Image (cartoon, grey):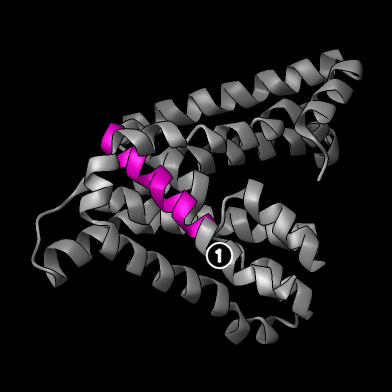
Amino acid sequence: MTDPVTELLAWARALSWQGVALLALTFAAWAAARRLWAAARGSAFLTPVLTAAVLIIGVLTAIDLPIGDYGRATTPLSAALLPATAAMAVPLWRMRVYLRAVWRPLVAGTIAGGATSFLGIFLIGPLLGLPLPDQLGLGLRAVTAPVAIPLAQSLGSTMDVTMLGILGNGLFGAMVTPLLARLALTRLAGLRDDDRVTGFTLGLTSHAIGVAHAAPRGGDMAAMAAAGMLANAVCTTLMVIPLL
């Protein structure tokens, strides 16, 4: 995997007005998506990541711009994923007392969820006609991209398949996870709704997209979403290591 600093230096040398315009498009689409999401009172079906992606794809299609050109223009945003993931240690430290109190169910849920997500692909992968390396890459769909991409490369997976799985899983999970988590808490377990549990589940199932969805709803929910994302990344990595 290319070093982020090297990527940024190469991007700066090749910077053009088109690149600046595409970066501006990205920020404008995100701002518009956040406004729409707020106007819809936080609808799970208008999650900003999905709406912004639709807006950007629409513009790229209208101007007939290859997606590769857009990817190169937005290199700084991609390069920021790794340090942004490392920075998740800050909200985790703030939630350390709560995490110590409930670590057992969190670990159990992480193992159950991570194993189901990764190993479950072997049930549907053959039905999709995918070769084994791509099945393994698709099994990483619930893992945050900075961790999933190097693992997928080591497994020989096709990056397009892995990224499609990550994006699709994140968007779908961000839409349905809050509803399912609240249903499980209030109807099945007979407990009151808890944003911390919903946040952890969002991060566990939907990685960074889940964290982005949780962020506007409050500090505790976002911090627990970060905890869920990192927990799943560690759990899945440990399952993949024997296959490398």
The answer to whether residue 86 is visible is yes
Q: Secondary structure at mark 1?
A: helix
Quarter of the image for residue 82 reads top right
Vertical arrangement, residue 15 with respect to residue 136, above or below:
above
The image shows residue 112 at horizontal and vertical percentages of 40, 73
The answer to whether residue 180 is visible is no
Q: Nearer the viewer, residue 96 or 151?
A: 96
Give the residue at x 70% y 67%. Answer: 137
Vertical arrangement, residue 55 with respect to residue 209, above or below:
above
Give the residue at x 66% y 68%. Answer: 241
Residue corresponding to mark 1:
236
The image shows residue 21 at horizontal and vertical percentages of 75, 17
Q: Nearer the viewer, residue 39 or 163?
A: 163
- As for residue 140 lying within the magenta part, the answer is no
Does 230 sit left or right of 162 as displayed?
Answer: left
| Magenta segment boundaries in residue numbering | 219-233
Give the residue at x 45% y 38%. Answer: 212
Quarter of the image for residue 36 reads top left
